[in-house]
Every structure is written in C-alpha cells, then in structure tokens.
C-alpha cells in the first residue's frame, strides 16, 4: 500500500531521467574527466597542450571547420531556392515534390554514401575533395531545405502583399520581407547542417578513400588506438565549438517560436 | 464639375471566376474623388475580391480598372498610387513601429529628415505618439491597426483601401475607431474605399454604399437612400431590420398587403401588379386601443433591447410583424397598428415564379436543373427546347436529400410575415425559389421535387 501512497505523477519521468543520466550525462562527464587526465588518471592539461602544439591536429581541425562552413554555405545556396519554389503556391502545388526532397532523410547516411561511391566509380569520377564536398552537400541538403520550407510555408502571405502595396518591387519584397522572415528557418537549417558536418567522419573516409582526414576521423582514430584521454580532449574541443554555434541561434527568441525543424 | 475630373476610379465590366464559381459578374462602378465609399455585402459576395483587384493583387478575367484616366488593370501593385490597410494588419514582425511606417517612404527615396517628420505626423494622426520604438508584437489589436493605418496614410496615397479593418476589434473599440476613421477621412481629403460586412458600420461611415451579393452590385446609393429605398428584398433584408411582405399594387398610390389595403406614395407599377412591400419595424405605430386602428393584432413576444422594445405581433389576418417601439406591450394583449403612407416602401418583384430552361426527353418527361422531371403531356415531342415554370409554393423540399429529384443547398432565407421565401442552390448552380411554412436553416442540404401537374411547359424558340 505504501507504494500507492507515494505515487506521484512525476515518478513517470524516472525511466527517462535514468536514461539521460546513463547515456547522456555520464558519457559527457567521462569525456570531461578523460580530457583533463593522463594515462595514470592524474589531473593534467597535457592533452590540450598536445593538440595546440601538434600542427597536424590543428590543421585537421581548421580544415574540418572550413569544410563544414563551405557545406553549410552551399546548402543555403542550393536549399533556399528549392525551399522557396516548393513553398510557392504558384510554382508548386504538389506535396509529392516536397516528399522527393525530404525522402533522402529517411535513408541511412552510410547507405547513401556507399551508393555515391559506387556511382562515382561507375562514371569514373575520381574520389577526393570534390567528391567529399558533393557527398556532404548531398547528404545534408534536405536538413537545410526542410526547416526553410516550413517557415516559408507558415509565413503570412499578406505581409508580402503589404510590402508590394507599399511600393516594393518583387526583388525588394524578397530581400526586405521574405528573407528576414525566413531567418528562423535558415538558423534552424544552419544548426542542422553545420553541427553534424563538423563531426562527420564516415563520409570523408568513404568518399576520399581515407586520403582526407576530418576532425571526426582524428577523434575516431585516437579512440580506436586506445588514446582515450587525447580523444576525449579532442571531443571536448569539438563540443565547445558546437555549443558556441548553438548559442548564436538561441539569442533569437523568435526562432524558438516560429522555427522550422528544431 | 465635369465627370472626368470628378471620377478618380472607374471600374468597367469587371468579371472574375475562380474555377466554376463566378465571384464578380460584370461590375461597373464610378468612384468619386474624395468620397468615402463602402463595399458592403455578406461573406462570399465578392467585395474583398473587388478591393484586391483595385489594389492589384488579383487580375480580372475581363474588364478594366481606370484610375485618373489611365488603365491600371495590368499595372502591378507596387506601381499603383494607392495603399491598403489589411484586415489582419499585416505589420512586419521583424520591424518596429517606426520602421514599419518608414517602409514605403524609404522605398520611395524620401529624404531621412522628411521621413522623420512625416512619421511623427502620421503617428499623431492615429494617436500613437511615442510608440516609435515599440516592437509591433507587443501592441494590442487596436494599436496594431492604428500603426497599419499610419503605415498606409504616411505615403499620401490618392486612394486608401481598407479591407474590414475593424473586424477583429471589440465593439467599443470598433465604435471609437469608426469615428476616428471618419475624422481622418475629412482631414486627409483622399478617397477611402472600405470593405465591410457590417451594415451599421457602412451606414455610419460612408458617403456612398455599394451593396453587393453574388458577385453583383445590388444597389449604389447614400446610406439614407439604401436604408429608406432598398431596391430589392435582398437589400431590404441585409440593411437593418425589416418586414418584407408580398403585396399587390391595386393601382397607383394604393397597395394591398397583410390582408389590408394601405395608402402609399408609390406609383407606376400598373394595376394589380405583384410587389414586395418593405416596412421598417420602427415605422409601425402601435397603440393599446385597438378600435380606431388600421388593423389589429396580438403581441406574441416583447424583448427589451436597450433603447426600444422589439415585439412580434400576429395580425388579425395571420401575418407576423416585427415592431420596435419605446413602450412595451404585454404579451397576449390585443393592440392596434398604423403605418404612414410614406413609410411603406414598394418594390418591383424580381420574379413571380421559377422559370427554367430545358428540353423534352419524351412527351411526358422534361430535362431541367440537370435531371429528368415528369410533366403533363402538352403535345411537345422529344428534343423540343422548352421553358418550364413552377410557382414558388409548388416546389417541395425533402429533408432527406436523396428523396428529391435533384439536390440543393438552402442559400438564403427571407421571412415574409406568414411564410419563408427560400433560395435553394442546386448542384449545377441554378437557383430554385421556394415558398414554404417549414423552417429550414441556411446551408441545409435538401432534396427538390416538383409534381408533374405543377410544371408548366412552354415551347422555347
């Protein structure tokens, strides 16, 4: 009977709290502990010093951020017009077209990448940096399109009419009203693309035949080779970078309310 | 003043359909410079479509809009010298009050100094001084509407379009804003084109009211004309409360309705012509002494409405009338009533029976309203083109829509004192007019049937 007396609805949250503690909080804590200790378990900054003094690791890090930035930029460049066309009732009325753009999101990223490798091989396009960029953009484009499409579709059409009414020609309407109002979708898209691209390693390995190393690859190699402390330190650095990007979008309250996918 | 300079916008033969639905049907309208003109009608009558065409957001299928002598039908909205106040404000959420109002001025390259002074003036006009830096999302509905008005008038348009601007505000606020809009119109001296479904608002604000229904203009006139001299039963019913009754014009200056003969001021209908008679509820005089009255009746209900009492009285001949009076009369009491000749408004009947075009499918069957009806043999053969007519009270409506020969939807209901006059829209978009004592609601789906003996067939050549 005691069990019933102490019954509280909040108890239902216990399984989730346990899950979060074991699979999210604990690993994060372990990453921090490992990052700030050496092999013998003593506190040490040695891992970070190693990172800063090793040009190879720093270069990979900068290169990875560069690749992530270019990928994100290309995704906006390709994704925004696509989302605009899909959401415009005059240009597209079919839900099928939207589905075709979103569909790749349902297929495992490794399967898609392996297929890309096979395709490039078949049409004799050499693997390398170009193939890597293609693979990244191809894989992450839907994550950019969808949130932008969502905000554009929810946008109040009378705002566009109001701008026209006040004397704005179509290009002015686009830059002064449509783009600013779709910023929540763009921010959301950037987060969906930029963050995962920093830590990608599978795409890079497969599409460059292991010739180009991204930061994710470096972390994976270190952990695989038993260098847990150094690997943890590198992971922590990456987490900090991701954390900083998410701060940018958090500043805008609007994006939380009207935002796309997140 | 001659017509050329006096008319600012001329609308010629404007038509528009969305798919099969005709939203505007050959609209012709002259809008005078500086007037406050209201497009009034129930939802779906085409008033907003017409306004959006004037603004340039929609293109007509045919016809032209001429402004100051220039045909602007094909001119895109950003090049038209008019501004719109939208129903749901449409303020830019990413800009503050000042930036919202400055939007149009900046696009027109107005010098910064002038922008500043013009915005201050516009804000003063809408009583929103000191709100420049506010976020538009933090404003109340009424305040947002004021900013929307300021954003439109700051550009000094020749014509201001207002699309139900007060519809989202509460009653008290709406009344205040009406007065302010009227005052603003006088101060600015520009043309206002106002869209509303609220007849009281239209009467309060306008110089000219355009009553619309079914994509057509029913009547154009001053508020007083529209109220006192409605052109048909639709306008009479839509504007204010009214008793609309079937009558017969015995001869000039004498009309018979509700079983009595009344002196009136109308003439030119011919003798024994069927007419519609409109009497406003405040124009029926009601007295406790039944003996000297023109006609008598029994009070059925009496409700206090603030300024007056609203009573339903059943007359000696079985008609029900709505009467408004400052005095209350007890329910069940016998009362006497008078109507002054000048308060009786007589209108030509639009039709006295249903007439459909069709053709014979055999000597005793006829195809009308997209279905086959039986009819009496009148010597016509298969394939002959015919007109079929049926009296309003001979059309039968069935609850179960499958029971009728064709299906329809009740579109409009008019109470005629002792029966209802319904407009039923069939599936192929034809209208069937029905007189009935049964109570139907707008939007009811009904089956329509007509018995063979009630269908009168004449040959069509």
Image: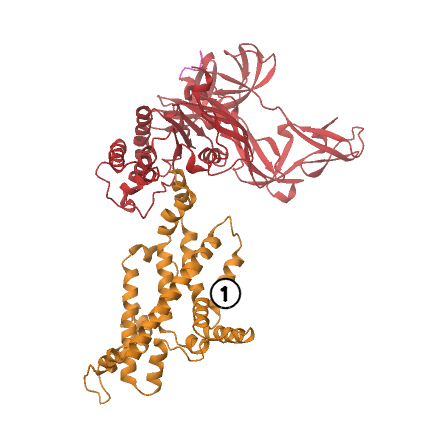
Residue B14 % position (x, y): 53, 30
The image's colouring method is by chain
> Residue at the bottom extreme?
A40
Q: Which residues are magenta?
A: B288-293
- Residue A227's place in the image compared with A156, above or below, is below
Magenta highlight: main SS: loop
- Residue A224's place in the image compared with B110, above or below, is below
Q: If the image is split into quadrants, where does the N terminus of chain B sit?
A: top left
Chain letter of disc 1 in the image:
A
Question: Nearest the camera: A14 or B179?
Answer: B179
The chain letter of the red chain reads: B
A90 sits to left or right of B373: left
- Residue B190's place in the image compared with A87, above or below, is above
Q: Is residue B15 visible?
A: yes
Question: Nearest the camera: B121 or B349?
Answer: B121
The chain letter of the orange chain reads: A
- Residue A8's place in the image compared with A86, above or below, is below
Residue B36 % position (x, y): 39, 25
Q: Residue at x 50, y 58 (%)?
A: A98
B453 sits to left or right of B239: right
What is the total number of numbered labels drawn onto the structure image? 1
Residue A238 % position (x, y): 30, 73
Q: Which residue is mark 1?
A: A103
What SS does tag 1 mark? helix
Question: Nearest the camera: B57 or B310?
Answer: B57
Q: Is residue A196 visible?
A: no
């Amino acid at each position: 009977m005691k069990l019933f007396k102490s019954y509280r609805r909040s108890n239902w949250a216990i399984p989730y709290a346990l899950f979060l503690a074991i699979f999210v909080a604990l690993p994060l804590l372990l990453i921090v502990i490992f990052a700030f200790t050496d092999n013998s378990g003593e506190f040490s900054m040695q891992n970070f010093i190693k990172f800063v003094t090793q040009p190879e690791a720093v270069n990979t890090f900068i290169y990875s951020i560069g690749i992530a930035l270019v990928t994100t930029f290309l995704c906006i460049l390709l994704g925004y017009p696509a989302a605009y066309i899909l959401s415009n009732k005059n240009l597209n009325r079919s839900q099928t077209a939207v589905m075709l753009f979103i569909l790749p999101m349902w297929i495992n990223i490794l399967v898609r990448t392996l297929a890309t490798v096979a395709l490039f091989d078949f049409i004799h396009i050499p693997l390398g940096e170009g193939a890597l960029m293609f693979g990244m953009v191809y894989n992450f484009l839907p994550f950019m399109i969808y949130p932008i499409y969502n905000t554009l579709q929810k946008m109040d059409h009378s705002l566009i009419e109001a701008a026209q009414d006040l004397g704005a020609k179509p290009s002015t309407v686009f830059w002064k009203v449509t783009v600013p109002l779709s910023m929540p979708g763009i921010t959301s898209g950037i987060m969906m693309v930029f963050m995962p691209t920093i830590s990608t390693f599978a795409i890079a390995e497969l599409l460059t035949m292991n010739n180009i190393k991204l930061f994710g690859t470096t972390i994976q190699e270190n952990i695989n080779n038993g260098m847990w402390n150094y690997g943890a330190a590198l992971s922590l650095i990456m987490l900090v970078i991701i954390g900083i990007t998410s701060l940018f979008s958090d500043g805008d309250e609007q994006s939380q309310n009207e935002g796309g996918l997140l | 003043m001659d017509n050329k300079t006096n008319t600012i916008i001329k609308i010629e033969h404007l038509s528009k359909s969305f798919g099969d639905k005709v939203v505007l049907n050959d609209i012709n309208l002259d809008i005078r410079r500086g007037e406050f003109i209201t497009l009034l009608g129930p939802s779906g009558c085409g008033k907003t479509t017409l306004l959006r065409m004037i603004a340039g957001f929609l293109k007509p299928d045919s016809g032209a809009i001429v402004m100051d002598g220039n045909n602007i039908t094909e001119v895109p909205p950003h090049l038209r010298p008019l501004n719109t106040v939208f129903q749901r404000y449409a303020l830019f959420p990413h800009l503050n009050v000042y930036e919202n109002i400055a939007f149009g001025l900046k696009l027109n390259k107005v010098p910064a100094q002038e922008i500043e002074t013009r915005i201050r003036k516009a804000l003063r006009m809408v009583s929103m001084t000191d709100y420049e830096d506010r976020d538009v999302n933090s404003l109340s509905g009424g305040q947002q509407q004021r900013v929307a008005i300021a954003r439109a008038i700051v550009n000094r348009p020749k014509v201001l379009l207002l699309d139900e601007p007060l519809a989202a505000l509460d009653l008290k606020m709406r009344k205040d804003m009406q007065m302010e809009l009227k005052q603003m119109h006088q101060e600015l001296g520009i043309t206002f084109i106002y869209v509303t479904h609220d007849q009281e608002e239209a009467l309060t604000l306008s110089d000219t009211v355009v009553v619309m229904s079914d994509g057509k203009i029913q009547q154009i006139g001053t508020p007083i004309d529209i109220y006192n001299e409605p052109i048909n039963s639709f306008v009479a019913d839509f504007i204010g409360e009214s008793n609309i009754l079937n009558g017969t014009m015995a001869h000039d200056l004498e009309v018979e309705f509700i079983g009595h003969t009344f002196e009136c001021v109308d003439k030119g209908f011919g003798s024994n012509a069927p007419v519609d008679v409109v009497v406003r509820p405040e124009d029926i005089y009601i007295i406790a002494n039944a003996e000297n009255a023109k006609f008598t009746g029994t009070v059925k209900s009496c409700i206090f409405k603030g300024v007056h009492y609203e009573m339903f009285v059943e007359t000696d001949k079985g008609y029900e009338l709505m009467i408004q009076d400052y005095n209350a009369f007890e329910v069940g009491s016998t009362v006497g009533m008078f109507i002054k000749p000048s308060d009786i408004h007589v209108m030509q009947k639009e039709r006295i029976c249903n007439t459909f075009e069709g053709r014979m499918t055999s000597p005793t069957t006829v195809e009308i309203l997209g279905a086959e009806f039986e009819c009496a043999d009148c010597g016509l053969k298969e394939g002959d083109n015919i007109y079929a007519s049926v009296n309003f009270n001979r059309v039968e409506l069935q609850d179960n829509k499958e029971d009728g020969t064709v299906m329809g939807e009740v579109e409009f209901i008019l109470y005629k004192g002792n029966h209802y006059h319904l407009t039923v829209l069939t599936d192929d978009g034809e209208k069937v007019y029905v007189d009935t004592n049964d109570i139907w609601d707008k939007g009811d789906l009904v089956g329509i049937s007509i018995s063979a003996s009630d269908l009168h067939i004449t040959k069509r050549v």
